[in-house]
Image: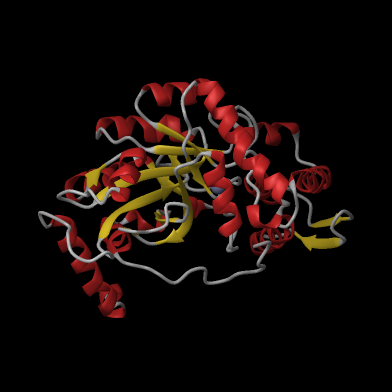
């Protein structure tokens, strides 16, 4: 109730959105809503409420995911991304608002928990994979979070960054993680790797602890099976950098090589990309959009919250990030239907345009 009182204008917009979704056709002005792309990261078993490698908000329970897919099937029309892109470019959206389900990063829980639910509701999702992480360790922000949260040390003295960070309790661990992420997001892959290996040395985790990082990411076998079951595969770069902060050559390599490697492994075109977003940073720009187009992609998804409208830029598709906080179906419905346009709330650095 409070949330409705707090956002009366949004509620009107949401009612309009749902009305649009349920109306027989969506014609009219160019700003008509064509659909919504949901952005997930991780789907976990009910009892798993916190994991050191991922922020709890980024993992939804399998039960909530099931409820959310059932809800979406009821009020929206499921579509795979390739058909959605084609339809909205051709202005050929039909009766109901379309929804597309997307996953970033490539966690193995996508295969274990999300895939059976997607199959149950006959939904073809797109999985944007961090190619260097397939069959290997999770993307660097996950590994960083894991090391900081698992260490028994109270202080980390990092000579590579000339900083000392307190990691003696949960609050200090969270702030150390955020500070390190802010510093590391500006580095290229090799710079990040050397900082990460110093953190790993200083965090001095037991071998048994480190083993928890094994098996967290999809294997190539899983990826093949997901494709065989009708799922789409997209690129989320090779190493999960914030692309505006690395050199153009490195960004080009992340964009092209990830596509090539996926295409060679799957023997099929890979035409969709999602920009890694390791924090509240501007993670795409005009130059990157041009590189993607040149490399042969058809679309690129952002973490900017919002619906997809007719005429929107296919290289900057907005999505609705689905977090654990939307466990309640009413709040999920409210968030998915609510129009949002202001982003990003915080930009720590501009990077290269
Ligand atoms: Zn990501």
Identify the image quadrant of residue 351: bottom right
Q: Based on the displayed image, in which of its 4 quarters is residue 332 positioned?
A: bottom left
23 and 315: which is toward the camera: 315
Residue 18: x and y in percent read 19, 61
Point 42% across, 61% down: residue: 305
- Residue at image location 65% in from the left, 69% down from the top: 348
Q: Which quadrant of the figure contains the N terminus?
A: bottom left
- Residue at (76% x, 40% y) in the render: 205
Left-right relation of 182 to 83 = right
Residue 14 in picture, x, y percent from top left: 24, 67
The answer to whether residue 78 is left or right of residue 20 is: right
Q: Nearer the viewer, residue 114 or 285?
A: 285
Above or below 231: residue 39? below
- Where does the image place residue 28, in percent across and percent down from the top left? 18, 64
Report the residue at 71% width, 52% height from top: 246
Question: How many discs mark residues in the rendered view?
Answer: 0
């Amino acid at each position: 109730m409070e949330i409705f009182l707090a956002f009366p204008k949004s509620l009107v917009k949401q009612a309009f959105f749902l009305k649009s979704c349920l109306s027989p056709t969506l014609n009219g002005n160019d700003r008509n809503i064509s659909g919504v792309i949901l952005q997930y990261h991780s789907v976990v078993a009910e009892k798993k409420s916190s994991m050191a490698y991922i922020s709890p908000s980024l993992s939804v329970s399998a039960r909530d995911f099931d409820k959310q897919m059932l809800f979406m099937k009821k009020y929206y029309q499921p579509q795979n991304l390739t058909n959605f892109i084609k339809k909205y470019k051709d202005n050929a959206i039909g009766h109901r608002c379309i929804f597309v389900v997307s996953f970033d990063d490539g966690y193995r829980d996508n295969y274990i928990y999300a895939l059976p639910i997607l199959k149950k509701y006959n939904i073809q999702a797109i999985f944007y994979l961090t190619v260097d992480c397939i069959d290997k360790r999770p993307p660097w922000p996950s590994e960083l979070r894991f090391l900081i949260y698992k260490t028994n040390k109270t202080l980390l003295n990092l000579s590579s960054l000339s900083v000392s960070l307190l990691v003696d309790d949960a609050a200090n661990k969270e702030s150390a993680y955020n500070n390190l992420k802010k510093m590391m997001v500006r580095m290229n892959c090799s710079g990040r790797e050397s900082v990460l290996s110093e953190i790993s040395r200083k965090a001095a985790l037991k071998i048994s602890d480190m083993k928890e990082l094994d098996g967290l990411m999809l294997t190539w076998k899983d990826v093949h099976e997901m494709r065989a079951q009708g799922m789409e595969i997209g690129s989320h770069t090779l190493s999960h950098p914030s692309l505006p902060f690395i050199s153009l050559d490195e960004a080009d390599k992340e964009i092209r090589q990830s596509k090539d490697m996926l295409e060679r492994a799957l023997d099929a075109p890979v035409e969709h990309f999602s920009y890694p977003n390791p924090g509240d940073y501007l993670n795409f720009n005009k130059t990157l959009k041009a590189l993607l187009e040149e490399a042969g992609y058809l679309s690129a998804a952002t973490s900017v919250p919002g619906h997809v409208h007719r005429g929107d830029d296919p290289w900057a598709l907005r999505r609705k990030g689905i977090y654990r906080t939307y466990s309640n179906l009413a709040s999920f419905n409210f968030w998915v239907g609510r129009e949002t346009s202001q982003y990003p709330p915080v930009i720590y650095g501009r990077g290269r345009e």
